[in-house]
Image (spheres, rainbow, N blue to C red):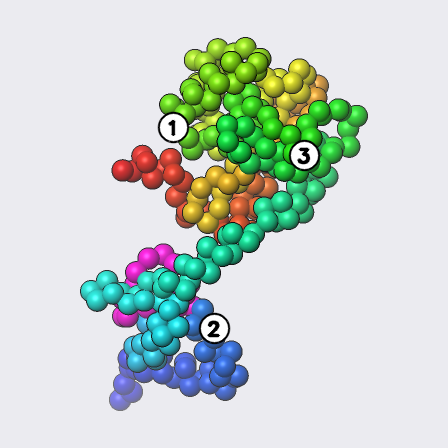
Amino acid sequence: MKQTRSNTDMASVAEKAEAKGPAGSQTLMRGLDIIDAVMDGPITLADLAAKLGLNRSTTHRLANALIERRYVTFMPRIGYQFGPKLLALGFLAQQRTDVVQVARPHLEALAAQTEDTVHLGVIEGDLALYLDKIPGRRRVEISSRVGERQPLTSTGLGKALLLDEAEARWRQLFERDQASGSPKADYAAWLERMKGYVEAERSFDLEENEDLIRCVAAPVRDASGRIVAAISVSSAAQYMADDRMQALTGDVRETAEAIGRDLGWSETAPTPRARTRRS
């Protein structure tokens, strides 16, 4: 009578079959699989072996090699998790990533698709700093310039940068901008719109910063889920009716998310506002 093979036996057979290929590349790929497996949090040896489709002894040997190089650590009764070397590499990669360089091909594609002016900006102090600008194909003059600083609470890009901030911070910046000469606005109406922007993960400029100019903006997040930049599509109000602004929302958000993915962001990264709601 035939006996059913155990999972361990089948894993051993699979490993032997794979051994026909280049051993070095297989070991490297398995090591990377372990690193991928600990990305979601600590994992036990049994769960790690099952996830990789390997037996425990092979999994233990591979994991120990990563522990020796400080890419992975092991905590008794908890399991394997990120090591200090991975944390250091992640920090260095983030520090050396130029958001303008990463974003540029995405901005150019969005500008070509929409035929409108596209901006990239970050927060600098209490203002929005414009880092890049791709002119549109329409005969529309957008007065923004690279290196220019604009109010956070009246620009679409600025509001996108503020989506994770607390309401107290919103009010502080709103009052500052109003005192600094931003077009006069009603805080209650502005606040209500901002709450809607948070839910939609995008913001609008409804001719609030520049007469007859409207824009749709969305935040760019990094690996931690934090907003590190924002992008916007701007055009004359005649090309930015309410229905077109709604239609552009998906394109602008998708572009912001694509830039974020190049910076290490993923859909599973919780936003600071979401973390606050859970606590």
Marked residue nearer the N-terminal end (3 or 1): 3
Q: Secondary structure at mark 1?
A: loop
Q: Secondary structure at mark 3?
A: loop
Residue toward you, 112 or 171: 171
Say which residue label 3 marks.
146
> In the rendered image of this protein, does residue 278 appear above or below residue 47?
above
Say which residue label 1 marks.
166
Is residue 117 toward the left or the right of residue 35 in the image?
A: right
Q: CA distance from mark 2 to mark 3?
A: 43 Å
Is label 2 in contact with label 1 (beta carbons under 8 Å)? no
> Residue at point 33% right, 76% down?
64
Number of other residues with Cα within 10 Å of mark 3, as a class: few under 14, some 14 to 19, many 20 or more: some
Count of numbered circles in the view: 3
Is label 3 in contact with label 1 (beta carbons under 8 Å)? no
Residue 232 at x, y percent in the picture: 61, 32
> In the rendered image of this protein, does residue 131 appear above or below residue 212?
below
Disc 3 marks which amino acid?
Answer: Val
> Residue at point 61% right, 19% down?
209
Q: CA distance from mark 3 to mark 1?
A: 28 Å
Q: Quadrant of the C terminus?
A: top left
Say which residue label 2 marks.
29
Disc 1 marks which amino acid?
Answer: Ala
Q: CA distance from mark 2 to mark 1?
A: 43 Å
Disc 2 marks which amino acid?
Answer: Met
The residue mark sitting in front, 3 or 1, is 3
> In the rendered image of this protein, does residue 8 appear above or below residue 114?
below
Range covered by the magenta-colored residues: 33-48
Marked residue nearer the N-terminal end (2 or 3): 2
> In the rendered image of this protein, does residue 79 appear above or below residue 91?
below
Number of other residues with Cα within 10 Å of mark 1, as a class: few under 14, some 14 to 19, many 20 or more: few
